[in-house]
Image: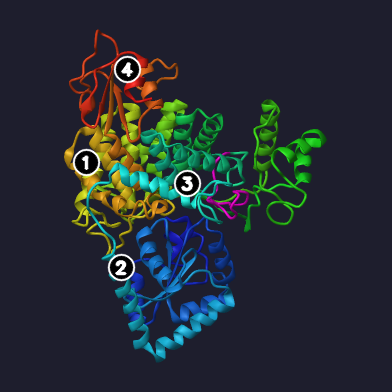
Amino acid sequence: MNRLGSATSPYLLQHKDNPVEWFEWGEEAFEQARSRDVPILLSVGYAACHWCHVMAHDSFEREDVAHVMNQHFVNVKVDREERPDVDAVYMQATTALTGQGGWPMTCLLTPDGKPFFAGTFFPRAQFVELLNNVAGLWQTRREEVIGAGQRVVDALSATDGHIPSGGSAPVAAELDAAAAALTKGFDAVNGGFGRAPKFPPSMVLEFLLRHYERTGDAQSLAMAGKTFDAMARGGMYDQLAGGFARYSVDAQWVVPHFEKMLYDNALLLRGYLHWWRLTGSPLAERIARETAEFIVRDLGTTQGGFASALDADTDGVEGLTYVWTPALLGDVLGPEDGPEATDLFTVTLEGTFEEGTSTLQLLHDPKDVERYESIRARLLEARARRPQPARDDKVITSWNGLAIAALAEAGVLLDPAYLVAATKAAETIVGRHLVDGRLRRSSRDGVVGSALAVAEDYGNLADGLLMLHQATGDRSWLTTAGELLDFALAHFGDGEGGFYDTATDAEALVRRPKDPSDNASPAGATSLALALVGYAALTGSSDHRAAAEAALGIVGTFGAREPRFLGWGLAAAEGLVAGPVQVAIVGESRVGESGEAPLTATAWRQRPPGAVIVSGAPDAFGIPLLAGRPLVAGAPTAYVCHGFVCSLPVSEVGALQEQLGR
């Protein structure tokens, strides 16, 4: 066993028995490189990554390859999900040097961390040749190698000056232009944007839904609806167990890359909830329920919180758990239901995946729902007897924040059990990851890791706690969210209205990462902005609203040019432009199982973009929106304010609907 045996990351633990003498990222590795006078080989990946496994089997598990690595390098293994700051810095270098990025990522560094070579996946022979060549260059042309590393760092640092911060808050015309710009890259045939591979554009879809709510723009709703429908019916969605895979390798959403990530499913749960809330689509409601069930059932941990991912591979084979042939369907379902399932799920003799197998699609709603449910249950039972993908069970603060927000809202709109799950996760994250006033990035098996949280952790957790506060009326979640946001303002701000991804006292890397654009999940800067918008609306804080406006200045600058990379910021900006819309309901608690809170139920079902909703007793202690708002004629009463201008209090559902602009 090498030095990774005590790691808290499942990805690092996958490599603990490699013959490679791996180090975790840290000063010990850099000291070794300096004392041995050798470069550092940095390998970055994550547990659910298919090609990371391939490179591990092909190279890192082989004695001959490990000998070359150990002889000429200090080898450092990093889980990109545990250390997104390290990943961000060296991914930028990889993209700059090669024109593309991805995982596994391989970077060669000087002993002081400067990258002089970078790439992604290397076949074994090419990898060994590269290592031997670099070892020779390090001995014979050292100054050139060091100079190359310095030039890379200088070039990356120079790009920081091109990332604007601050500026004016976005205005309605800029958001309209961003929505219009999205039509240019929209795939009107298959849904989604651009060409294959297609990733779920969750953050852009949230913007489009909010934009439709504010403006009534039918094209925005149509783009979102087409995409939601196509993703739900294709093979990227697990038609048996619920939940979405990471992305589709084709433009038609047929064949997924089979890893299932918490952040994708949390964002998509929220999206399908909002699509259902706007349209009443039965498909949207079903997918929201099934995705929530998947998160709670398959990603829930006994320690509290939600696991990060299910692997892309099973026993080293991608998709082994999930794919079918007509014969396999017949074996499970028999001669009567087998052909029915073959047709229903578009399983062909040729196959839609590899070696004649097919993913399951549900391109049309079944005519016989009862028969469909029976078929689905039997197939899922049979699939459960197959080998199952590994689970990355580390609990990441940011992704749990996304899940808390989605499940809290699902708990109000669909089933109170989801609110229970969201509350338990929040108690776990706040109780375990908040150490001496500082958030940590992750934990595993109840043990918190040493890596400090980054900006997205603060923003997404704060947003989740704010949603939980609205769903439960518990003021403690509002208080904790405010503390997180105040810390972020003090320690992540760049002094011009924007945010760095790491805190002022975080470990110093060769450059301090700062990227306001969304990637697989919301950017740190825009996640903080979204939470600041919500917190300001809930508390009336002008300081937090001003901070949100400054942080969203980049949306006004780049939103119309690059809307696909600023979806979360555009969604947050819709909340600013629309309000804030504040709904305070006195005399009702949150929506209960019997629906005895009609005003609250109406507000949640018909909430305008970015609106905040709080229900409780008049003048409930510590809840600003309920202060000074009495019952009218002894009946439960709703108070609605748009942009700091309040309408007359109402006690009838119809009057509330009218005030909410429906």
> Which residue of the protein is positioned furthest toward the top in this rendering?
633
From which residue to which does the magenta span run?
242-260
- Asked if the residue at tag 2 contacts the one at tag 3, i.e. Cβ–Cβ closer than 8 Å, the answer is no
Does residue 4 appear in the picture of this structure?
A: yes
Q: Secondary structure at mark 2?
A: helix
Q: Position of residue 347 (x, y in %)?
A: 72, 45
CA–CA distance in space, label 1 to label 4: 28 Å
Where is mark 3, residue-wise?
Answer: 264
Q: Amino acid at mark 3?
A: Asp
Q: Secondary structure at mark 1?
A: helix
Q: Position of residue 461 (x, y in %)?
A: 33, 43
2 vs 4, front mark: 2
- Asked if the residue at tag 4 contacts the one at tag 2, i.e. Cβ–Cβ closer than 8 Å, the answer is no
- Asked if the residue at tag 4 contacts the one at tag 3, i.e. Cβ–Cβ closer than 8 Å, the answer is no
3 vs 1, front mark: 1
Q: Residue at x 23, y 37 (%)?
A: 536
Residue 248 belongs to magenta span: yes
CA–CA distance in space, label 3 to label 4: 34 Å
Q: Amino acid at mark 1?
A: Arg
Q: Nearer the viewer, residue 351 or 461?
A: 351
- Left or right: 123 with respect to 73? right
CA–CA distance in space, label 3 to label 1: 28 Å
Q: Give the main secondary structure of the magenta stretch.
A: loop
Local crowd size for mark 1, using a 10 Å CA cut-off: few (<14), some (14–19), many (≥20) = many
> 588 above or below 391?
above
Q: Amino acid at mark 2?
A: Thr
Residue 159, label in figure? 2
Q: Secondary structure at mark 4?
A: loop
CA–CA distance in space, label 3 to label 2: 29 Å
Q: Earlier in the sequence, mark 1 or mark 2?
A: 2
Where is mark 4, residue-wise?
Answer: 588
